[in-house]
Image (tube, rainbow, N blue to C red):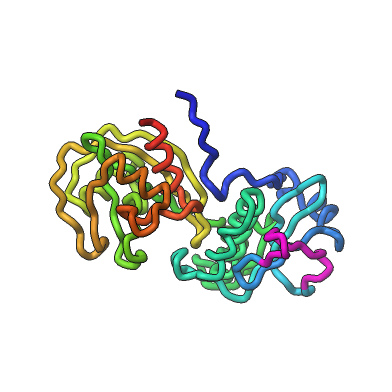
Amino acid sequence: MTSLLAGPQFTGSPIDRADHVRSDPARLAEVMVPSARLLKLDGLAPVMDEHNSLIWGALSEAPGDAELVFLGLRDGVAHVAMVPDKGSIDPAYAHRHSWAAMTLLQPDDLAIYGTARSLVDWHARHRFCAVCGSHSRPAKGGWQRDCVNEECGASHFPRTDPVAIMLVEHDGRLLLGRGLNFPERRYSALAGFVEPGESIEECVAREVLEESGIVVGDVRYIASQPWPFPSQLMLGCHGIAQNSDITRDETELADVRWFTHDEVRAAMAGDGEDAPFLAPPPQAIANFMLRWWLERG
């Protein structure tokens, strides 16, 4: 069956990252003109107009000493974001203003904002060299930071942390959990960071076993999504459970349980208080994955 699902949100940016420009200082200088477009941000939060679109100003509005990130080219025009004073390592639910704004942005704008947020947040939190402790400065249009200490000269690059997120199936049911900080009745796919020396498949099996006591096999990839809180790559997977008795990790989850196909469909339909649980929000890849599972029948 051919899927009619749109891809996960935060993907599909219309901006060309233009590596051939950002890696060439002369070409980069040519496009970083005063009329280049500067993304308006309130700290790390998006600033929107009355049509719920991102607001852009001119690069000339940025202070002369501002750290800038070259997002890329759109219609031949440079698009830029400015690094704020402070970054954040808080999870998505802690950014209520940003979260509310994201529900209103169109997919193109959401993808642009997600990229910009990840980059400027990384810069705000990495102003010092991790090797020698000296100051570092943006390079390659903001896609790199270089140590200013000539005896060190280390280069540092924006981090993307891989996270496996998985739908675990057993006899037509799905295993979903509720995190300790989740809103009441909110359930989602289990997830965890991929650790050093570990494949995606191994991460899926380990995380599910640790959090629920369920043994998982036949793991396969579904889709991925960049997640800018602060900068993760969500790797959506599906696996088959080899047992069904749950042993919950009480340090990670408030609850974990099996849900039937009908229960998942009712939750995704948003049947209010009558729904068996609150589904993940549309911005999250877990929402996409649940729709994918329902479409499969």
- Counting from the top left corner in percent of width and height, residue 148 is at 64, 68
- Counting from the top left corner in percent of width and height, residue 239 is at 29, 37
- Counting from the top left corner in percent of width and height, residue 69 is at 69, 60
Residue 55 highlighted magenta (yes or no)? yes
Residue at figure coordinates x 28%, y 54% from the top left = 177
Q: Is residue 203 visible?
A: no
- Counting from the top left corner in percent of width and height, residue 41 is at 67, 68
Rendered position, 159 above or below 166: below
Residue 141 highlighted magenta (yes or no)? no
The residue closer to the viewer here, 271 or 202, is 271
Residue at figure coordinates x 69%, y 65% from the top left = 48
Q: Is residue 86 left or right of residue 65?
A: left
User: Which image quarter is the N terminus in?
Assistant: top left
Which residues are drawn in magenta?
47-62
The residue closer to the viewer here, 188 or 231, is 188
Q: How many labels were placed on the picture?
A: 0
Residue at figure coordinates x 81%, y 51% from the top left = 77
User: Which image quarter is the C terminus in?
Assistant: top left
Q: Is residue 200 left or right of residue 122?
A: left
Q: Is residue 235 left or right of residue 72?
A: left
Magenta segment's dominant SS is: loop
Rendered position, 217 above or below 97: above
Q: Is residue 31 visible?
A: yes
Residue at figure coordinates x 26%, y 62% from the top left = 252
The residue closer to the viewer here, 70 or 28, is 70
